[in-house]
Image (cartoon, coloured by chain):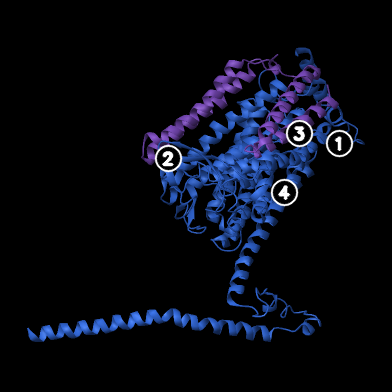
Amino acid sequence: MAANRSQGSYYTLGLVAFTVLCAGIYEWSGGMGKLLALVGAAGIVLSLFGMMRIKSLEGKVALRSSPFAMKMVGAACSLLGWVITLFGMHLTPSTGGRIALALVGIAVSLFGIIVVLPAAFNKNAIWKT
Amino acid sequence: MKKSIRGSCLFLCFLAIVCATAIVAHAQAPAAAMSMAPSADQELKDAAAKAPAVADLAKGDPGGTSTGTISDVPAADSTKGVTVPDVANQVGQNKIAINFVWTLVTGFLVMFMQAGFAMVESGLTRVKNANHTYMMNFFVYTVGLFSYWLVGFAIQMGASAGNGNLGGLQSLTGEHTWTLFGKTWGYSGGSGMFLAGHTYDVGVMVIFLFEMVFMDTALTIVTGACAERWKFLAFAVSSSVMGALTYPLYGNWAWGGGWLAQLGANNQLGKGYCDFAGSGVVHAVGGITALACALIVGPRIGKFNRDGSSNPIIGHDVSAVLIGCFILAFGWFGFNPGSTLGASAAGNLRIGTIAVNTMLAGCTGTFGALLFMWMKTGKVDYSMSGNGLLAGLVAITAPSGFVSPTNACIIGVVAGVLVVLSCGFIEGVMKVDDPVGAISVHGTNGLWGVLSVGLFADGTSNYGGAWNGVTGNVTGLFYGDASQLAAQLVGISTLIGFVFTFSFLVNLVIEFFVGHRVSIETEVGGLDLPEMGQLGYPEFVFKAEPDYLAHANKEAVAAA
């Protein structure tokens, strides 16, 4: 499926709904704010499900399913590294200790990004067949 | 003994007389100053009397010696003429005007970088996808700007009041905070949505324009890494989210008074996270998001062989690539020197040094990549040379306001070599297909730029006496402050730990609802006709693709 009118319509709906949602947040304390936010959020959901409905029309893509759990592990590793760095700042007052813990955090994040995620995405890569 | 007592008494009397004289003199000083005031007003009146008359000016002023006099200073009360307060107000407004014009003009230069990105990215892709790649770079400007106006600006800069260069920006108040470990940490701004209400303000408009073009630079980085197989709809949705959330969040933490900026005040880590013009905020955020998207979108058909080796997929237009690089280098003179947000006062005369640092790092970045490739392959590679220039510029973006020209050269040459190594690693080891090298240029070197502040900042820059609310100058490890390096490492960890994960999960959701990738049929035939409805170069006769690509296309269709 190439680009088509449905895509354009659902994207326009999403943009308008996002604008309405933002207007609702801006006017949150007023009477109309919450209503606008609700309408906007509903519009975004409608737009996303509309896009999902026409997604299968795209036809075959050069991608195969890859292990979802492994992707989540990669993302979790990446996030864990950040958490280590954040807590490292408060575990020790020494600059050297904070630098060391930040480096550990960066290494854990990089492990998730450089090792785990590519392995997940390349496991069933189409170029391997 | 008596002599001694008398001597002491005399000394005390003398001291008392001196003190009394001083007190009287001090008491009279304001009176004297007050008596000066009418004199100053009188001088202003004399100057007004001597100013060229309208009749004189009507004769023309070819030398420019009669234009711009006291006659041009507006008087609050025309019956009194120009007074000292009038002159002081005019001086204040002139300072702000200079800074407004400086920030706006440099913002216009940064906006023009969109043209450079469009040319570089399209030039490095195949002719059958030229229209699609150009259109992504064109539309990202609109998508990003709209999202940023709706909410992105409020999240990023909605609590950035206190910038004296732009008149205070006092209407931007209201950072949302968390209290953690006994300290208050900012995580999002709160005012400025739609630029409405009290943020309908001249200073706010200037900072909006400047920050918006930076945000758009980050967004356009992703389009390069996902070129030649990214569905236009998915690109549009992904860019909307990035302009509204991903970029503004990190931007707030670093530039909007958020928790990274507070690391100095709260945790005694240097002057807090320092990113002068955006190696981290703009380029690393763009490059890291590009990596997240490129992983999900997957490599182009034919990029990798069954044994994992990769095939070169050559771009269609060298001239577009290299002219695009020059446009980007030109725009960078807005990017870095403009980040002072002013040319007058608060140490802003350092703009000359910042511009020269920018030039030099681009120069040595080009040397680094060009010579490395020349020695490695025996040929001068145009795409790597261009990427070397950009890598040097990306790397100097964060430290440009804090380092010497010599250190700028070192940062640039390291960036030039790093971009070549990083491209090889991302393609050869990670098996991620990045047609233009955006992840390496902006991601890897953005991180290197952030790190280099913690190493090379020499402590000579002083922008109003403090940075991120901490008194003193930004100083790196090599100049005696290891804690600044720690702050920079926290920033790097946030980029690869938080920004990557956030972008990755957001784009996984988009993959679920929208689907990132075009069909095999569209990809093989080129995206221009199916996605855009028109070829980029309709009068060109397309050559058949190389055997390895044609073969891979058939295999992909069969395997899917």
Q: Position of residue B61 (x, y in %)?
A: 77, 80
* Mark in front: 2 vs 4: 2
- Chain A: give its colour: purple
Q: In screen coordinates, is B101 left or right of B261?
A: right
Q: Chain of mark 2?
A: B
User: Mark 3 sits on what residue?
Assistant: A16
Pointer 4 local density, CA inside 10 Å: few below 14, some 14–19, many at least 20: many
Distance from Cα at disc 3 to Cα at disc 2? 39 Å
Q: Amino acid at mark 3?
A: Val
User: Mark 4 sits on what residue?
Assistant: B111
* Mark in front: 1 vs 3: 3
Mark 2 secondary-structure assignment: strand
Discs 4 and 1 carry the same chain letter: yes
Pointer 2 local density, CA inside 10 Å: few below 14, some 14–19, many at least 20: few
Q: Residue furthest right?
A: B539
Q: Which quadrant holds residue B24?
A: bottom left
Q: Are marks 4 and 1 in contact (CB under 8 Å)?
A: no
Distance from Cα at disc 1 to Cα at disc 3? 30 Å
Give above or below for B458 relative to B47. Answer: above
Q: Amino acid at mark 2?
A: Lys
Comes first in the chain, label 2 or label 4: 4
Mark 4 secondary-structure assignment: helix
Q: Residue at x 65, y 63 (%)?
A: B98
Q: Residue at x 69, y 31 (%)?
A: A35
Q: Chain of mark 1?
A: B
Q: Position of residue B146 (x, y in %)?
A: 73, 41
Discs 2 and 4 carry the same chain letter: yes
User: Mark 2 sits on what residue?
Assistant: B183
- The label on residue A29 is none
Distance from Cα at disc 4 to Cα at disc 1? 23 Å
* Mark in front: 4 vs 3: 3
Give above or below for B171 relative to B133. Answer: below
